[in-house]
Amino acid sequence: MPVRPSKRNFLARALDITGCGRMLRAASTWEGVLILNYHRIGNRHDSLLDRNLWSASDEDFDAQIRMVAKNFDVVGLDDLETVMHGHSGRHVMVTFDDGYLDNYTNAYPILKSHNVPATFFITTGFLDVPKVPWWDEIAWMVRSSSKKGLDASFWTSTPIVFDEPHREAAINRLLAIYKNMTGVVTDDYVEFLAESLGTGRCPHQIARELWMTWDMIREMKQNRMTFGGHTVNHPILANLSGEQQDEEIGNCRRRLVEELGEPIDAFSYPVGGARSFNSDTRKALVKHGFKWGFTYLGGYCHYGETDLLAIPRTAIETDIDLSMFRAITTLPQIFA
């Protein structure tokens, strides 16, 4: 059954059709910093991995970046402090999480073509020793399995019937279970799924094709791209002890400084919701010299009102078409 457009989608399209969106962009209806957050760029349709990680196709990303470059003051991480103290203007910042290879092969050339800077938050362990991350591995196992569901168990509590053909709802449910676990048991959970689904663990060859390299990052650094931390192994930090969080955050920064040869003062929280970081996370960031902490909470930065260790970012995800993207940037107070 086709998905019915929401009222939010109807309003976004109405802004385009009536021309109101164009007039509102010219009228400067908001002031502050709208920070957009992406993960992957490219074609997701045939992937066995987590398709929700693709933020846009190449064509859509090009159109989005062209649009913000034409209508807003696009700033980079190096501009953020000045902008936040400027108290005027509409600024847009582009960010990416994780460090996927398509950030270099697909997104980077488009950013360069429009002379737009972006900040990439890197999970350093994925570059040092490539592996398939937990969200992609769980998606791969569900899509690769010959089974039609999972029985109730200690982990799942009730049966999970796989929704065909894409099995998206089943994947999302299994990922949600993972996100609520302490770091002590997450490996056991993934092993349980590998055995129960009959797939085993994801082939290492996939990991070797997923991530950027440090040489790629150094090249990007020479062309206005900036970098921040995103932990070593991408755990949900609030599910770890304070000592474990300190190691993830401190070792991530150490590797970035070693490879890039410059101070690193920006960090984005894995998953990034309100329950993904806590007071221990904040303490570790301050201890290791991070000035900025970026969330995934939505909204935009109002001048003089932003917690610098909980900076809001607006997710650009697969269900956001160009009409919705224009609405988000035109009226972030409603759509972001």
Image (cartoon, helix red, strand yellow):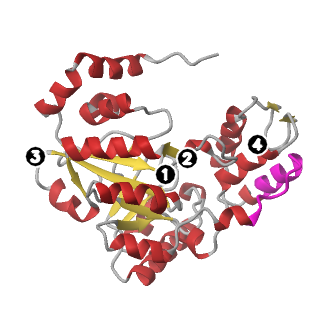
For residue 143, the mark is: 4
Viewer-nearest of discs 3 and 4:
4
What residue sits 16% from the left and 40% below the top? 31
Report the Cα–Cα distance between label 1 and label 2: 6 Å
Instruction: Residue 237 in the image: state x and y as whole percent.
Output: 54, 59
Q: CA distance from mark 3 to mark 2?
A: 33 Å
Rendered location of residue 159, percent (x, y): 83, 31
Q: Report which residue position mark 1 lands on.
A: 39
Element class at badge 1: loop
In depth, the one of 90 and 243 nearer the eye is 90
Q: Residue at x 38, y 40 (%)?
A: 298
Q: Which residues are magenta?
A: 188-204
Amino acid carrying mark 2 in the image: Leu
Number of the label disc, if any, that sits on residue 53 = 2
Work out whether mark 3 precedes mark 4 in sequence or the reverse, and give the earlier one.
3
Q: Earlier in the sequence, mark 3 or mark 2?
A: 2
- What amino acid does circle 1 point to? His
Q: Does residue 146 appear left or right of residue 130 in this picture?
A: right
Q: Which mark is residue 88?
A: 3
Q: Decide: marks 1, 2 in contact (CB < 8 A)? A: yes
Query: Label 4 vs label 2: CA separation?
Result: 15 Å
Q: CA distance from mark 1 to mark 4?
A: 21 Å
Q: Amino acid at mark 4?
A: Arg
Quarter of the image with the N terminus is top right
Check disc 2: other Cα within 10 Å, few if <14, some if 14-19, many if 20+: some
Q: Where is the C terminus found, in terms of image quarters? A: top left
Using the rendered image of the protein, determine whether residue 273 is visible from the camera's viewpoint: yes
Query: How far apart are the two marked residues, 3 and 4, measured between alpha carbons?
Result: 48 Å
